[in-house]
């Protein structure tokens, strides 16, 4: 008992002495650091870096370093961090007195049909689809399987992306969209035959034109499926093979319809300042579905200039496209799918109210994949190292758990959208329109054409 008491006393002494010593050391170090910051001349001062960061950004300084390292084109994943106009200045008009909201037991029709004029339209249970993220050029087989499995459970579609055809992905998926990309493996007869919809990819929100695939990044199964050299880089074409002028598109689509066997044919483009000109070509070519990727879209890798400085915001893209299709009398015949920066149920529902038929989600399912698995990778690597194809950690991803997390996220988002529809006093997505929204500022009102929340008037002064 005496020994125990003595031990406790010794520990207390060490604690108090150690605590005092620790406080003294920290205080002296703090004093030295603050002293240097307040006394060093600016060109010798660490605060010079803080000043530079405030003038630019941490990301810009990082990318300067990456360019300086090898003098090569750098590839930034997940798109631009640039703040762009989105849906925050739009609000829904709730039903309460003049129009009554619906009760919780009223079913909401969330089903969507894409490519209605095709012989075999694509029908999905919710308006949220998993965007194209290619095997090998982006995601691992484990990640693609998890996404496909989740899409099947949700009754929605998953997109192959720009990678090669992956048989196991098709087996896991319910509704499957094959993306015909600007690559040698893009026009895969196997992928075309297995798909429920075809999507010709001419551009996307964060990438445009040719891009280079390094063999080291796709070594293994993806490289074999692509049929490319294990030692030579591959540079994709800038346009779909067979297209030399805008007038080549109608014949291209006509020929593709033979292979499609009645399935809808979509075209995916980057939304740009010349959007109406591009849409006119899409209509002339007779595509069934138009997929618009706004400037907030991401990619597994694209140069910062393409990410930050090409395209227009997703909100502007949707409004301009819907208006143009309506003016051309094509709105009922051509489905409109939007992508790029959609991350909340509110943004998705507002897009539908403004005319979108469905929304592609990329970032949301991507981060849902690693939910409850972050401890496998943090703090030493970014979360995406669990899902990228060229990551040494990709096999740590639990496919079943990842799939369940994606299902939960999209299911939750769809349930929130249903709740929103009831709050508007509606019973289905098809009943939504611009009149269900108001704008919080003059710019948003002018851009979208919806009513202003307050009727601004010009000042008489």
Image (tube, rainbow, N blue to C red):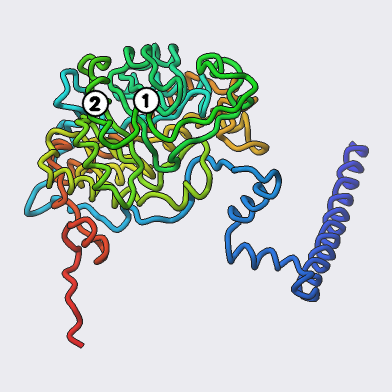
For image coordinates 39% across by 55% down, the residue present is 84
Q: Residue at x 44, y 29 (%)?
A: 133
Residue identifier under label 2: 251
Figure quadrant of the C terminus:
bottom left
| Left or right for 137, reference 187 | right
When the figure is inspected, residue 135 is found, relative to residue 354, above or below; the finding is above
- State whether residue 124 appears in this view: no
Residue 338: % across, % down:
30, 40
Query: Residue at (34%, 53%) from the top-left corner?
Result: 86
Give the number of marks: 2
| Mark with earlier residue (1, 2) | 1
Report x, y in % for residue 42: 75, 74
User: Dot 1, crowdedness within 10 Å: few (<14), some or many (≥20)?
Assistant: many
**What residue would you read off at disc 1?**
179
Task: Give above or below for 323 relative to 168.
Answer: below
Q: Quadrant of the N terminus?
A: top right
Q: Position of residue 395 (x, y in %)?
A: 59, 20
**Secondary structure under the numbered disc 2 in the rendered image:** helix
Horizontal relation, residue 112 to residue 295: left or right:
left
Which is in the foreground here, disc 1 or disc 2?
Answer: 2
* Neighbour tally class for label 2: few under 14, some 14-19, many 20 plus, Cα within 10 Å: some
**Left or right: 21, with 187 as reference point:** right
Residue toward you, 102 or 429: 429
């Amino acid at each position: 008992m005496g020994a125990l008491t003595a031990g406790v006393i010794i520990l207390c002494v060490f604690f108090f002495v150690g605590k005092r010593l620790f406080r003294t050391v920290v205080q002296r170090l703090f004093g030295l650091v603050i002293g240097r910051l307040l006394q060093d001349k600016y060109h010798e001062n660490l605060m010079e870096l803080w000043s530079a960061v405030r003038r630019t950004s941490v990301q810009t300084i990082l990318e300067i370093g990456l360019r300086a390292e090898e003098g090569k084109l750098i590839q930034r994943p997940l798109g631009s961090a640039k703040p762009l106009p989105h849906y925050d200045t739009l609000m829904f008009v709730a039903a309460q007195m003049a129009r009554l909201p619906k009760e919780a037991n009223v079913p909401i029709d969330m089903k969507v049909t894409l490519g209605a004029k095709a012989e075999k339209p694509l029908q999905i249970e919710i308006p949220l689809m998993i965007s194209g993220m290619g095997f090998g050029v982006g995601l691992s087989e484990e990640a693609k399987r998890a996404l496909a499995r989740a899409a099947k459970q949700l009754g929605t579609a998953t997109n192959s992306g720009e990678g090669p055809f992956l048989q196991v992905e098709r087996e896991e998926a319910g509704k499957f969209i094959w993306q015909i990309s600007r690559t040698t493996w893009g026009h895969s007869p196997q992928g075309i035959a297995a798909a429920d919809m075809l999507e010709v990819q001419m551009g996307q929100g964060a990438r445009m034109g040719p891009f280079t695939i390094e063999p080291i990044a796709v070594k293994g199964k993806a490289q074999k499926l692509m049929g490319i050299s294990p030692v030579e880089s591959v540079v994709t074409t800038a346009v779909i093979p067979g297209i030399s002028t805008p007038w080549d598109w109608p014949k291209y689509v006509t020929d593709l319809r033979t292979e499609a066997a009645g399935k809808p044919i979509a075209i995916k483009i980057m939304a740009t300042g010349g959007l109406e000109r591009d849409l006119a070509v899409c209509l002339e070519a007779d595509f069934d579905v138009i997929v618009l990727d706004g400037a907030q879209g991401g990619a597994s890798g694209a140069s910062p200039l393409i990410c930050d400085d090409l395209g227009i915001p997703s909100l502007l893209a949707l409004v301009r496209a819907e208006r143009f299709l309506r003016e051309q009398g094509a709105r009922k015949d051509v489905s409109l799918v939007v992508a790029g920066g959609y991350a909340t149920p509110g943004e998705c529902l507002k897009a539908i109210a403004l005319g979108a038929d469905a929304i592609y989600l990329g970032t949301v399912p991507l981060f849902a994949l690693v939910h409850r698995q972050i401890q496998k990778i943090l703090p030493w690597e970014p979360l995406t190292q669990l899902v990228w194809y060229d990551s040494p950690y990709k096999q740590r991803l639990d496919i079943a758990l990842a799939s369940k997390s994606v299902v939960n996220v999209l299911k939750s988002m769809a349930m929130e959208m249903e709740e929103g529809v009831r709050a508007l006093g509606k019973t289905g997505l098809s009943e939504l329109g611009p009149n269900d929204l108001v704008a919080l500022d003059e710019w948003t009102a002018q851009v979208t054409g919806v009513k202003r929340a307050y009727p601004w008037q010009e000042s008489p002064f």
